[in-house]
Image (cartoon, rainbow, N blue to C red):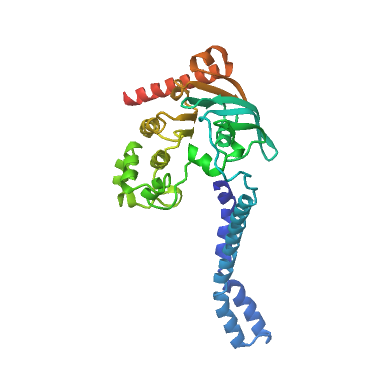
Amino acid sequence: MLDWMKSTQGYSALMMTIWPAVLIGVLPVGCLFYMNSSLSAPDFITIAILSLGIMGPLVAAIFLTDDFSKIATITGEITAVLSEPDLDRPSQRKNLKGLDISLRDVTFAYKDTQVLNGITLDIKQGTTTALVGPSGSGKSTIAKLIASYWDVGGGHITIGGVDAKGLPPEQVMDLIGYVSQDNFLFNLSVRENIRMGRPDATDTEVEAVAKAANCHEFIMGLEHGYDTIVGGAGGHLSGGERQRVAIARAMMKNAPIVILDEATSYTDPENEAVLQDAIGRLTHGKTLIVIAHRLSTITGAEQIAVVDHGKILDAGTHGALLERCPLYQQMWAAHTQARDNDQMEGGAAYV
């Protein structure tokens, strides 16, 4: 944006300087026509007066072309979303045998880009499974397929022994609470954003959940407390505050399966400690699927799956992977080195 502005600024300034100076051209040319008797004095005066007012509409018309471009872009994006085919799912709920999740030879592609290449993974009910790997390896795609954001391209995903394609969307949404790194808040009050997790929740229940998510104090510090409007996409709140409201919304939903897609990746250390505490309360006793770059936060997981280039290289506990998985060993070494550097820099700053 800055490079584009710099490249066009000179031409724009030149245009806005020269174009409004219409009399520089109108007066000498008009005088020439008048002296040659091809233009009468009343017409000459009228033209000179009108020329002073012509630039306003022309500039407005030029800026209007920008609005047309914005409209074309926005309508194009909306049309692209609305033209996507709907998921073909049944309407009748199914009886599940537990909540174990199983992925078998799952493949998936974004249009022509193949992302997953035969993912096989078992996630037991009530356990924590972490997905780790380089950026772009397919971790978030796996999580979103489990949450039925898309249908798998090949293979199948089962929840409680039933193929996810055979479950109605409402049933899947009741089973899964999804917290991502860029959660969206609607331009409503804080109370209504939290209540979206369970629309029939009372004000007392909303406030109880907010306290459990460690966001009651900052909410009470807002201008209108729980009735404060958060702005478009939650723009009136900081990133950490938006994330805590999103966690409170997920806690209100109380789904038995919770997916955390790098939920604390963009938060500062102070907010991360608060968020980790809130996440601990949210996920207590539930099936947890977590995607994290900070490996120290998932060392206690019952299962860690290492994902690379759309495949699961290995799965096991932290200790087992340190012994047998080269990629995990590299990631852990890089993580511990970065953590040590941060601690050294923090200690130097403190001193």
Camera-nearest residue between 207 and 136? 207
Q: Could you tell me which residue is drawn at 58 percent across and 72 percent down?
A: 22
Q: Position of residue 221 (x, y in %)?
A: 29, 46
Q: Position of residue 244 (x, y in %)?
A: 39, 39
Q: Could you tell me which residue is drawn at 49 percent across and 37 percent down?
A: 175
Image quarter of the C terminus: top left
Answer above or below: position of 57 versus 108. below
Q: Could you tell me which residue is drawn at 39 percent across and 47 percent down?
A: 195
Answer above or below: position of 302 versus 257. above
Q: Position of residue 77 (x, y in %)?
A: 61, 52
Answer above or below: position of 30 versus 4. below
Camera-nearest residue between 272 and 179? 179
Q: Within the image, what quadrant is residue 60 found in?
A: bottom right
**View extreme (front): residue:** 95
Viewer can see residue 11: no
Q: Is residue 340 left or right of residue 110?
A: left
Viewer can see residue 164: yes
Camera-nearest residue between 149 and 89? 89
Q: Could you tell me which residue is drawn at 60 percent across and 40 percent down?
A: 150
**View extreme (top): residue:** 323
Q: Position of residue 326 (x, y in %)?
A: 58, 16
